[in-house]
Image: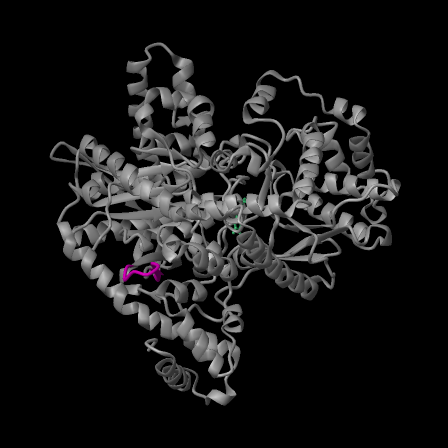
């Protein structure tokens, strides 16, 4: 079908006629997408079946990566690329008068995630398959992914996302593998042969129906599975309940992605989603294992279950329930198997994001699971009591159930054999501060796995121009072995290479400029510095620091006719969680500043501010290759890792950032002289939090630049905004600037001056850029996944 151009063209036209029931001449771009998608899936199917066959025959250990989010983005382009058929398809379509790029744009992003956490899961799937590792994802098939963002008068408006509107060519519904999930009801206890039996009765059941999506590795026959669960009414409707209400409540479970992963709003539906994912996943894992191995006594030798953050942590009590109630194992045996099967990744130290569930919600919804969590807690506390006799304070702080709450991170640590952070700094903070007591209790469980991103999507696919230059310079081995990018290092000072690198960047900037014009009607200077901050809108990520600095530049340009800057285009993209009003005010502020700056003739040729709406994976793929400067300016200690930073680095952007998350390791890799670092360190921030001593007022009063921009938030400088920015003003002064925006302002402004100096020296800039690309191989998720495979999962490549 994809053997050569002519075969492909014939197959495409025939397929189009059979699938769409029309002649080629009448077909639309959507038809082309649909047909090509089907052809690709058909092509994948053979390898998919073979991979599953091989896994069964070889009885190899399988990894299941449980995640409440998978932020996949579009799949057609990456599947074509991974299958190695992209050139044939592109050529063939061109001869039929079709642009592959247009076809790709027909695909809706699979946006089943909020940001970094969900995108990490998607990158991991790509690396697992490419490394021929038997690793599969399990998640929820939300009918609506993360909301679509519209900007109206500078304000964010959320629209329901509809990625399934035109169907999904990548999925296969597997109704025969449906799993029943039980909620509510009560537990009946009886005794038989001296053993207690537990029966969950009067439950309200939900049918979890799997939709499988193939995960194709690059240049390999391995096709793994992403299984997404959809909630449907069970065959037996509950008798006591209104049918329509039951149907509504059931379908609601897989209707919407929970809109934020850092602010926990504590809704029962969220807990339902979590247990739904876990019970369905374990149901299918256990079913497959029983078929192959008979019973579950050696489950941990054949299965590794990874829980991505605490959302799927109920996998621990659910596995206990299966082993105890269904298999009749002793508690000790069940606990041994469970803790040797499950591993946990922590993604945050923000305490407001550490999940806890009130018992009064948890117990009625999941009565048997709650009993098991209680038992886990009792045994855990008893163990602690033996270890730390009399130390009530410590036990209280470590308990899984305390003060009417179930603490999910504590359950995760107690019930798994591995706890990892996602960057060195983050893991150190977990060990020394946030989870110190747990680290003292079980230091062997703790380890670090610095995040990575798949360089195949974020470099090879997103930036074919740069990829071609790299391959021309060092050959193609970097595609399979990203650490080979290091071979670019000797070329970093070569004027010819630098010129080519600059030309690629120019090309991508022109392309993005055209896109910006198409979307906003604003013409930006293609030779200006493209300074980019794209990521979720969050106070700790400090988009505010960026905006206040732009306001300062604007003020200076207006007031001082001798002052000039190298032309800058500041580009933002960010969604704010719908209930996060502070973040929404920042979005409005960015637009207010853009409105002022972009319409002011005085600064016209030096400053532009662009906000691109509806930031998502496919938009990121357009923006990142065009960036000169990557803004990674979180309050130190707050960003667990960041992965945006890695995508930019790979594409030759230079990082303007704090020593936070993986920025620290990027700096170790490239050297401080190849980045623009500024601001408080994590140590200093944590010291302030512990000992106080920061007074935002002093920075406001002593730095005229700061006073001016902060005052402008409330003094009528933005006439249409009224008092809308007052809460931002208050957060900085009345609430003493929790994220140290004013504290870091001067250092940030100075770092911007260093950026400009470097940019004015092209030989220096492009050398720095090349050095960053050369050292980015370490931040490929292939490296991360290889580490998980060896250190945590104990799995090895097949074939
Ligand atoms: C990579 C990515 C993120 C994470 O970015 P950070 O800068 O690490 O927060 C969020 N959203 C999308 C669409 C991404 O591709």
Left or right placement of residue 663 versus residue 533 in this view? left
Viewer can see residue 363: yes
**Span colored in magenta:** 211-222
Q: How many marks?
A: 0
Tell me if I can see residue 660 in this picture. no
- Does residue 511 appear to the left or right of 439 in the view shown? right
Q: In the image, what residue occupies the spot 42% across and 14% down? A: 393
Seen at 47% across and 83% down, the residue is 95
Q: Residue at x 38, y 45 (%)?
A: 275
As for residue 718 lying within the magenta part, the answer is no
How far across and how far down the image is residue 650, in percent? 50, 49
Residue nearer the viewer, 391 or 733: 733
| 219 within the magenta span | yes
Q: In terms of depth relative to the viewer, which is nearer, 447 or 200?
A: 447
Looking at this view, name the residue that lies furthest to the top.
390
Name the residue rendered at 70%, 64% in the picture.
517
Residue farthest along the left direction in this orientation: 193
Please state the horizontal and vertical placement of residue 73, each as a whole percent of the image. 48, 58
Is 61 rendered above or below residue 703?
below
């Amino acid at each position: 079908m994809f053997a050569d151009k002519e075969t492909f063209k014939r197959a495409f036209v025939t397929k189009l006629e059979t699938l769409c029931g029309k002649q080629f001449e009448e077909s639309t771009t959507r038809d082309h997408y649909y047909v090509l998608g089907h052809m690709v899936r058909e092509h994948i199917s053979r390898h998919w079946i073979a991979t599953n066959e091989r896994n069964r025959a070889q009885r190899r250990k399988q990894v299941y990566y449980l995640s409440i989010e998978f932020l996949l983005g579009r799949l057609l382009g990456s599947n074509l690329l991974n299958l190695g058929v992209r050139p044939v398809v592109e050529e063939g379509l061109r001869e039929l008068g079709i642009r592959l790029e247009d076809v790709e744009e027909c695909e809706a992003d699979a946006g089943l995630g909020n940001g970094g956490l969900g995108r990490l899961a998607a990158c991991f799937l790509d690396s697992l398959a490419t490394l021929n590792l038997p690793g599969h994802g399990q998640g929820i098939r939300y009918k609506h992914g993360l909301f679509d963002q519209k900007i109206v008068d500078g304000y964010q408006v959320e629209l329901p996302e509809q990625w399934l509107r035109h169907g999904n060519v990548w999925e296969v519904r597997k109704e025969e593998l449906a799993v029943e999930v039980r909620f509510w009801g009560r537990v009946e206890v009886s005794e038989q042969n001296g053993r207690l039996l537990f029966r969950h009765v009067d439950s309200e059941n939900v049918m979890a129906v799997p939709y499988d999506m193939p995960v194709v590795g690059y240049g390999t026959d391995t096709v793994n599975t992403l299984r997404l669960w959809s909630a449907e009414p069970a065959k037996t409707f509950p008798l006591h309940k209104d049918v329509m209400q039951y149907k509504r409540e059931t379908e609601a479970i897989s209707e919407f992605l929970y809109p934020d992963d850092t602010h926990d709003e504590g809704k029962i539906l969220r807990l339902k989603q979590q247990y739904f994912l876990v019970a369905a996943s374990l149901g299918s894992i256990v079913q497959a294992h029983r078929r192959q191995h008979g019973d579950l006594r050696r489950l941990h030798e054949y299965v590794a279950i990874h829980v991505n953050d605490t959302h799927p942590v109920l996998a621990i009590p659910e596995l206990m329930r299966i082993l105890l109630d269904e298999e009749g194992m002793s508690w000790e045996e069940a606990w041994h198997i469970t803790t040797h099967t499950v591993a946990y990744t922590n993604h945050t130290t923000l305490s407001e994001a550490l999940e806890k569930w009130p018992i009064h919600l948890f117990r009625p919804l999941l009565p048997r699971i709650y009993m098991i969590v209680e038992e886990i807690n009792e045994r855990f506390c008893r163990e602690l009591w033996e270890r730390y006799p009399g130390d009530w304070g410590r036990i209280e702080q470590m308990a899984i159930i305390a003060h009417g709450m179930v603490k999910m991170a504590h359950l995760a640590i107690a019930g798994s054999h591995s706890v990892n952070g996602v960057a060195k700094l983050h893991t150190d903070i977990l060990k020394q501060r946030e989870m110190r007591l747990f680290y003292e209790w079980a230091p062997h469980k703790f380890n670090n796995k610095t995040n990575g991103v798949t360089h195949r999507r974020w470099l090879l696919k997103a930036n074919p121009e740069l990829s071609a230059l790299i391959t021309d310079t060092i050959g193609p081995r970097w595609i399979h072995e990203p650490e080979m990018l290091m071979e670019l290092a000797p070329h970093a000072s070569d004027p010819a290479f630098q010129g080519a690198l600059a030309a690629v960047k120019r090309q991508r900037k022109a392309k993005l400029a055209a896109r910006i014009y198409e979307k906003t009607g604003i013409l930006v200077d293609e030779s200006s510095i493209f300074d980019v901050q794209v990521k979720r809108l969050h106070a700790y990520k400090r988009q505010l620091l960026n905006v206040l600095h732009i306001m300062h530049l604007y003020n200076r340009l207006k007031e001082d006719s001798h002052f000039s800057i190298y032309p800058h285009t500041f580009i933002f993209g960010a969604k704010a969680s719908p209930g996060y009003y502070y973040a929404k005010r920042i979005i409005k502020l960015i637009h207010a500043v853009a409105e002022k700056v972009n319409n002011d003739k005085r600064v016209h040729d030096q400053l532009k501010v662009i906000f691109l709406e509806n930031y998502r994976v496919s938009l990121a793929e357009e923006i990142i290759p065009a960036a000169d400067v990557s803004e990674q300016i979180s309050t130190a200690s707050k960003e667990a890792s960041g992965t945006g930073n890695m995508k930019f680095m790979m594409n030759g952007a230079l990082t303007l950032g704090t020593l936070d998350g993986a920025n620290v390791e990027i700096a170790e890799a490239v050297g401080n002289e190849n980045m623009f670092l500024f601001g408080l360190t994590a140590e200093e921030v944590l010291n302030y939090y512990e000992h106080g001593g920061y007074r935002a007022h002093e920075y406001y009063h002593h730095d005229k630049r700061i006073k001016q921009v902060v005052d402008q938030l409330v003094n009528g400088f933005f006439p249409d905004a009224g008092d809308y920015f007052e809460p931002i003003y208050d957060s900085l002064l009345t609430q003493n600037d929790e994220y140290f925006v004013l504290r870091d302002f001067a250092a940030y402004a100075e770092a911007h001056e260093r950026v400009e100096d470097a940019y004015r020296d092209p030989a220096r800039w492009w050398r720095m850029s090349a050095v960053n690309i050369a050292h980015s191989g370490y931040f490929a998720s292939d490296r991360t996944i290889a580490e998980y495979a060896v250190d945590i999962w104990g799995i090895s490549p097949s074939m």
